Amino acid sequence: MDKNQRNYKKLIGFWALVFLVGGIAGIIFGQLVIPWLTNFRPFNKIGWLCHVKEGTTIINRTEKIYLTQDLAYQEAVNRLANSVVAIRAERSIKVSQQQAPSAKPEVLARGSGFILTGDGLIITANVIVPKAATQILVFKDGKEIEARLIKRDEKNNLALLKIDQTNLPVVNLGDLSSVKLGEMVLSVGAEQLKESLNKFTNFGFIRTLLPEVAVTFSENQLATGGLLANLKGEVLGLVIVDKEGKIKIAGEDKIRELIKQ
């Protein structure tokens, strides 16, 4: 091996050692020195140093807000979706079939609802369970369950149903009066598609607070009887969509009043 080859190998070894030592030093500096520096002024005022200490990489503050909202939205939807059900109201009509009378159900209304208590209380919109209905069916977990109408609140368009099941997933009621103008909220609804329960979600923002809370949603896919919630997963009310597509919110305070009556 000539002298030039030996020098070349030494040079490669030298730079490999430099990169190795530099990498180790960088790790030590990032994990130990920077967190220690942020305990003192003026280093604790430098934003990127504080983010390194927290173990987060932020391109800009706006992106951080969006990431936080996205995670909160997903967690809230996942927590609430198990309590959302599809509801169908029917009326039996006597018809003649091969000279034998049989009851053929006529669907009067469809919509969503959500479970309030573990022993089977469900809240929905009053328009989903018209007085002419002879049977109310709740669809959840791939099964249809017959429900009983407990009481109505026609003024606020609410109806309280009961199914004979226990240990059901429930929602937590929040406080609609505490929402702020421009606050992000979400809706979760459901519909029965043959033997499956299709759940869907939508997000929106509080558009106005007076004379009543109004929400602007990002899309038109909403179900009467679906829930309105904040990003904490607290239910703020029940969504009602009229025939003209106008959205009204029956607040959680009205739901509480109906339960207590």
Image (spheres, rainbow, N blue to C red):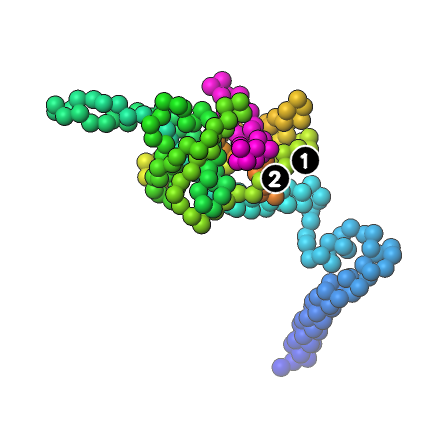
Taking the spot 61% from the left edge, 26% from the top edge, the residue there is 214
Residue 21: image location, x then y, percent: 72, 71
Kind of residue at badge 2: Gly
Residue 192: image location, x then y, percent: 37, 35
Looking at the image, the residue that sits furthest to the bottom is: 1
Taking the spot 69% from the left edge, 41% from the top edge, the residue there is 62
Residue 252 in the figure: left or right of residue 98: right
Kind of residue at badge 1: Ser
Residue to which mark 2 is pinned: 174
- Where residue 224 is drawn, which disc sits there? none
Residue 205 in the figure: left or right of residue 90: right
Tell me, yes or no, whether the highlighted magenta stretch contains residue 152.
no
Question: Quadrant of the rendered structure where residue 215 is?
Answer: top right
- Is 224 located above or below residue 15 in the figure? above
In front: 145, or 62? 145
Taking the spot 43% from the left edge, 27% from the top edge, the residue there is 128
Does residue 25 appear anywhere in the picture? Answer: yes
Q: Are marks 1 and 2 in contact (CB under 8 Å)?
A: yes
Looking at the image, the residue that sits furthest to the right is: 41
Residue 118 in the figure: left or right of residue 179: left
Q: Which residues are magenta?
A: 237-261
Residue to which mark 1 is pinned: 178
